[in-house]
Image (cartoon, rainbow, N blue to C red):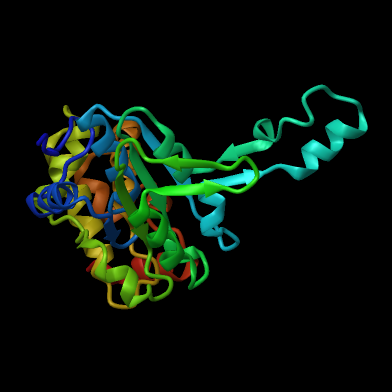
Amino acid sequence: MQEFQSTNDYVASEELMASVNIAMALQKPLLIKGEPGTGKTELARAVAQAMGKELIIWNIKSTTKAQDGLYIYDTIQRLYDGQFGEKGVDDIAQYIKLGKLGEAFDRDEQVVLLIDEIDKADLEFPNDLLWELDRMEFYINETKRTVKAKHRPIVIITSNAEKELPDAFLRRCIFHYIDFPNKELMEQIVKVHFPNVEENLLKAAMDVFYDIRNIHDIRKKPSTSELIDWVNALQLGGIPTATIRSALPFIGVVVKKDEDLELVKKGGLS
């Protein structure tokens, strides 16, 4: 079986790679949690790239139902077409639109399916979703057609832990929490984006970045993407390394709340 490894654009820990590979081997959904900016959503892109597979993304909203992922019968469009005498109105099939889960089932080749931010939906959604994932097929009442998966998709589900997920759902998933990268891993991540970054600049920026994250009362801890943006800003601005801690140039790239900015400037880094 082909295994997932870090790509040129995504640095994964050994533990994360192992979780992805065991989920694929067991043919179970992989549930990913972690604080914002730890690469949960980008993991699915990396897996698709590494495995040479199409990526299908299902972005979950508060109003999303499991049925939305299967198919939608566009009755309004059919009614509209009927009023204006469009041809083919009697062909219901042309008004059936597969959802993201339906698309994944209907593909001729195995795909990677990202179900992004599942905790935004209502409490019934995860269990309803599992029923469809277990069966790997669904029935379209309007056309009397059964859509059966030709290949079980590689399913990656992300959660920001906004609400608890049902125990029944958790039992059926492989779970992995992406820890925030330590300095060694973070250096590798930044160098993926800026392979020629000056070492002293990167060290100074990372030291300040982690010190900000460690401030006790900080409300929004800066994320990996914000460090990457800050390093880029420092390089573009030609900022001397020695002034990064004292002057905090472009600190608004890293700190995004008034209260946090005040904490930092009041000596939170001393």
Residue at image point 14% right, 39% down = 4
Q: Is residue 114 above or below residue 235?
A: below
Quarter of the picture holding the C terminus: bottom left
**Is 202 above or below relative to 165?**
above
What residue sits 37% from the left and 46% below the top? 114
User: Residue 30: percent from the left, percent from the top?
Assistant: 25, 55
| Residue 149: percent from left, percent from top | 37, 40
- Compared across the picture, whether 116 is left or right of 243 comes to right
Please state the horizontal and vertical placement of residue 78, each as a whole percent of the image. Answer: 79, 37
Q: Nearer the viewer, residue 55 or 266?
A: 55
Nearer the observer, 34 or 68 = 68
**Quadrant of residue 93 within the rendered picture:** top right
The image quadrant of residue 200 is: top left
Establish if 173 lies above or below 112. below
Looking at the image, the residue that sits furthest to the top is 87
Instruction: Answer above or below: position of 249 versus 35.
Output: above
- Residue 161's x, y, as percent? 37, 69
